[in-house]
Image (cartoon, rainbow, N blue to C red):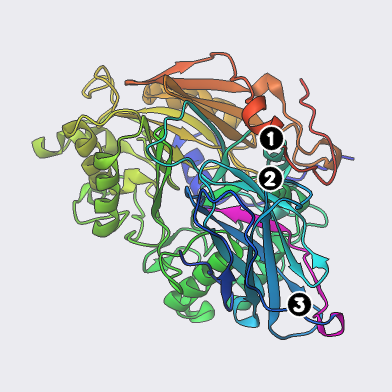
Amino acid sequence: MAFNFQGEFMDSKRRGLIKALGVGGGLALAGCGGSSSSAAPAGTPAVRTPNLPDDLPESVVPSVTFVHGVASGDPLSDRVILWTRVTPAEDGDIPVRLTVATDQAMSQTVAVYTATATAARDYCVKVDAEGLQADRWYYYQFSVGTQTSPVGRTRTFPESDNFIDRARFAVVSCANYPYGFFSVYRAVAQRSDLDFVLHLGDYLYEYGPGEYGDFPERDPLPPQEMVSLTDYRLRHAQYKTDEDLQAVHQQFPMIAVWDDHESTDNSYRDGAGNHQPLTEGDWEARKAVAQQAYFEWLPIRPREPGNFSVIYRQFQFGDLIDLTMLDTRLEGRDEQLGVPLDPARNSENRHLISAEQMDFLLDSLSQSTAQWRFIGQQVMFGQLNIAELPSLTEDQAQLRSNLSAINMDQWDGYAADRLKILNHIDDNDIDNVVVLTGDIHTSWATEIYRNPSSLLGDLFDKPLAAEFVTPAVTSPGFPDGAAELAGVLIPVVNPHIRYVEAKSRGFILVDVTRQRTQAEFYYAQSIESYDLRGQIDTSKTKVVAVNSGDSRIVEDGPVSWPRTLRTALNNPALPLNSVSGNEVLS
């Protein structure tokens, strides 16, 4: 049975854009009490026998369940974060064992780790499973006595100096539980040959029941907007019981960053559009507990123990990909401007990221020797304008096209920071830069220029980068009618934007070779029918690509071939808990 519910309120970013267009309305532990590891250095072929404490007598083993599944994330060449949450029958510290093996049956053990689940970390367990071999797939399982978690599947990345000819990963964002089933997550979980999943934020939403989605039997918990640490923990716990989200985490390592809704809508360093100090307390306290819960419940590696505020970091997938992840939301962002025509958006004193994070990004781009340089971040990087207006002064020539920008939450509201990055790319002859973005609940493929206006800009020069924006998992895009009109109108005044799809939920499959990076936009058949979860509407599939050495977007090539031998055959995916994922043609 299919349900079709249209929420009564559209969040401010989509509403503002539609209105403007005139179309309608080493360290082995993080987040648990302590751990030890039996893993030997990478490359050691033999099974290690850990020096572990004797098993507890069965009569004193705590009674627990693993209702929130397992997850892995932040893979490096010699380690990966492994996560679970223990649900105890009674409060108290819980000794947990983690086994890593090379087979699904967990019989070919390569490492064993121990940790303690405590109430102080909401009984979440995160182990940085170090001492693993590079470019290998593994299976893992947590246990308390004879009580075991589901088996998970994960991998390490190739070492940075290894020649790699191909990588495949999925890009997702914006999963609002009360808007429908996580069909997109199931479709991703069925792609057995992916190397990892990239989540670009809005992993969960803060609203209370009926405030942003009202799908039957998917009311958010707790039954009010999340503000306290208990609230954030309960919301994370609810999301982690979803079988389709569990399936993604069970099959692949995830690299994730937060956007605004993990704290609250339109958040920035010193506040948020959806935070009322008089009724919701101090912003710094709310931000801190939101960040703490995120680090407890996500398989993300802290910079150091107890640091829940820094999420910008870098990953290397052999010599093929350098991936730099940014925090454009909470770390250095100044408050969003309220008026799109405010010239302050071009001020060098307004920042989306801090000076420290900017240096980190620019250094990462300069020092990269990989074939491709990816930037994973939250908000749209390319300019999104509704008119081409002349600049006010000569020294703002490169910012001319930004004068008519309409969404001040994006990089358009912080144009000097964007220009600094683009000048750095140009001045240092850095090529093969691809920006991956979430946030806006719609699909975009954009060529990146300093000034993309067709009359007064550099649109006919070589683009400096390309940007692919992933659609939402469930959160709404434009309504019917407005979506179709936006798809026609936006490219007219934004010729650098080569593809727009403004309403369908889905994900991007990114297929990377030495010769090209290809983004394949796949859209779910339905987020309203339980029986159609995971099925793809192939009539909507869109393929765009950029070739090595040239960031101009090429459209409508063939979809990439699955990589069956190296991943799916030799390191098979785990069985999904229900529903086969046949693609259907509408």
Q: Earlier in the sequence, mark 1 or mark 3?
A: 3
Q: Earlier in the sequence, mark 2 or mark 1?
A: 1
Mark 1 packing: few (<14 Cα in 10 Å), some, or many (20+)?
Answer: some
Q: Which mark is residue 55?
A: 3
Task: Find the residue positioned furthest to the top.
Answer: 557
Alpha carbon distance from label 2 to label 1: 8 Å
- Quarter of the figure with the N terminus: top right
Q: What type is the residue that disc 1 sits on?
A: Ser
Q: Is residue 140 left or right of residue 276?
A: right
Residue bearing the label numbered 2: 251
Q: Which mark is residue 505?
A: none
Task: Find the residue positioned furthest to the front.
Answer: 46
- Residue 480, by quadrant, is top right
Callout 2 secondary element:
helix
Q: Is residue 443 left or right of residue 53?
A: left
Q: Residue at x 79, y 84 (%)?
A: 90
Alpha carbon distance from label 2 to label 3: 29 Å
Mark 2 packing: few (<14 Cα in 10 Å), some, or many (20+)?
Answer: many
Mark 3 packing: few (<14 Cα in 10 Å), some, or many (20+)?
Answer: few
Q: What type is the residue that disc 2 sits on?
A: Gln
In this picture, which residue range is highlighted in magenta? 58-73
| Position above or below: 35 against 539 | below
Alpha carbon distance from label 1 to label 3: 36 Å
Q: Are marks 2 and 1 in contact (CB under 8 Å)?
A: yes
- Quarter of the figure with the C terminus: top right
Residue bearing the label numbered 1: 192
Q: Are marks 2 and 3 in contact (CB under 8 Å)?
A: no
Q: Residue at x 57, y 26 (%)?
A: 520
Front residue (pair 311, 414): 311
Q: Earlier in the sequence, mark 2 or mark 3?
A: 3
Residue 407 in the image: state x and y as whole percent. 40, 44
